[in-house]
Amino acid sequence: MAAGTFRNVILCEDIRDEVGNKKSLMGVMAGGGINVASFPATIKVAVFLEYEPGAADGDHITADFRLLQGDTEIAKARFETAIPQPPVVFVFPTGLMTCEKEGTFRMYVAINGRPEEELLSKNISVAHPATS
């Protein structure tokens, strides 16, 4: 049986509920990294995910998420839900992450007890001014 797949994994600064069951994503961190002015830095982070269930998921999903800064686990969460009309949407509300130095922000997930997989990886570094 086929496992499901994540269609969208979006790191941003804030996620707001809108009328009509819509979400507004603010400060989307596109590209390969997170740029800060200097260290230490406090960064606002929120995550929006869409999961398309597969036959192996049955009618219920248990999703175990871990967020890491470097090798240090900074947060974890478990979501359990009956599968509604696909896709299943997971929203991590805004939190603050303090970074003392360059490193990597990563997110892992294990669905229904399957092996953990990396969903997101962003390098955190000092932004360099543009040169002309």
Image (cartoon, grey):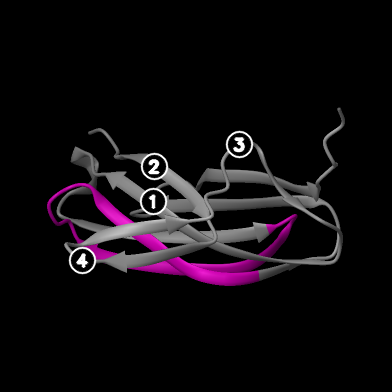
Q: Which amino acid does label 3 sit on?
A: Gly
Residue linked to disc 4: 19
The reply, left or right, for residue 130 in relation to residue 120 is: right
Q: Name the residue under label 1.
A: 49
Residue 52 point in image, percent of width and height: 26, 42
Q: In the shown orientation, is residue 105 left or right of residue 28?
A: right
Q: Earlier in the sequence, mark 1 or mark 4?
A: 4
The residue that label 2 is drawn on is 8
Q: Quadrant of the C terminus?
A: top right
Q: Which residue lies furthest to the front in this view?
A: 132
Pointer 2 or 1: first along the chain? 2
Residue placed at 42% from the left, 63% from the top? Answer: 15
As measured in the structure, the alpha-carbon distance from the residue carrying label 3 to the one carrying label 1 is: 17 Å
Label 2 is placed on what type of residue?
A: Asn
Mark 2 vs mark 3: give the one in front. Answer: 3
Q: Residue 31 carries which label?
A: 3
Alpha carbon distance from label 2 to label 1? 5 Å
Say which residue appears at 56% left-offset and 41% top-offset: 30
Q: Quadrant of the N terminus?
A: top left
Q: Disc 2 to disc 3, how far (Cα)?
A: 14 Å
Asked whether the beta carbons under mark 2 and mark 1 sit within 8 Å of each other, the answer is: yes
**Magenta part, dominant SS:** strand
- Contact (CB < 8 A) between labels 4 and 3? no
Disc with the residue nearer the chain's start (4 vs 3): 4
